[in-house]
Amino acid sequence: MMANNAHSNYHHNNAPPAAKPHDVRLTITWLHHSSARVLETVRPSLRALQDAALAYIRGNPHAFENVTAADIASTPPLPLPPAHVRPGSSAPLPPSPPAAVQHSGGVWALRAVVKRAWFGDESWDLASYRGGDDLTKLFASLGGQGSIPRLEVEVDYPRS
């Protein structure tokens, strides 16, 4: 038991400090649809930038062109509570969504990739960046040029 507490404290004490949020200009390109340009405040990380782009599309799908009912029909998957949690319930289970929606996932199945960053006049390719999720050092070294960084995020359905 003591080993678990020591292990837990090790990770807690060595966790990186929470990065301060930065204003960014996002160009969100939803492939086969169109692009949108938005201002966001995010932590300097690839995941935060991806999440911001996906949240924008999910909340504003009609800001893009060629959006079909299949693109927006799905809702996020919600797990049903186990049967032992609903004893004696006579309520019917909710209906399943149509098969096409189950397979496509609509906007909930989208994936995002941060492609490029502009800090001032400098452009940086991030599509093949292998430095991990944390972009704090990049934002600190390049973001102090007096302008709001611009990042390009490409969004599409996963390829099977």
Image (cartoon, rainbow, N blue to C red):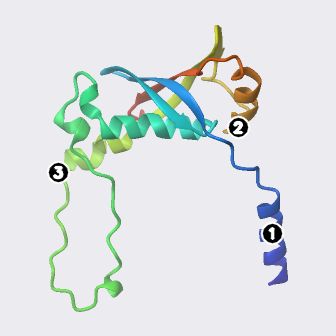
Q: Amino acid at mark 2?
A: Gly
Q: Quadrant of the N terminus?
A: bottom right
- For label 3, the residue is 98
- Label 1 vs label 3, nearer the camera: 1
Q: Secondary structure at mark 3?
A: loop
Residue 42 lies, in percent from the top left, at 56, 38
**Image check: 15 left or right of 22?**
right
Q: Quadrant of residue 125?
A: top right
Q: Amino acid at mark 3?
A: Pro
**Image check: 70 left or right of 119?**
left
Q: Is residue 1 above or below residue 45?
A: below
Residue 85 lies, in percent from the top left, at 34, 85
Q: Which mark is residue 104?
A: none
Q: CA distance from mark 2 to mark 3?
A: 38 Å
- Earlier in the chain: of badge 2 and badge 3, it is 3
Whether residue 110 is visible here, answered yes or no, is no
Q: Quadrant of the C terminus?
A: top left
Q: Nearer the viewer, residue 52 or 105?
A: 52
Q: Quadrant of residue 135?
A: top right
Q: Amino acid at mark 1?
A: Asn
- For label 2, the residue is 132
**For the point 35% across and 79% down, which residue is it?**
82
Q: Is residue 3 above or below residue 24?
A: below
- Label 1 vs label 2, nearer the camera: 1
Marks 1 and 3 close (CB-CB < 8 Å)? no
- Earlier in the chain: of badge 1 and badge 2, it is 1
Q: Secondary structure at mark 2?
A: loop
- For label 1, the residue is 9
**For the point 76% across and 31% down, which residue is it?**
137
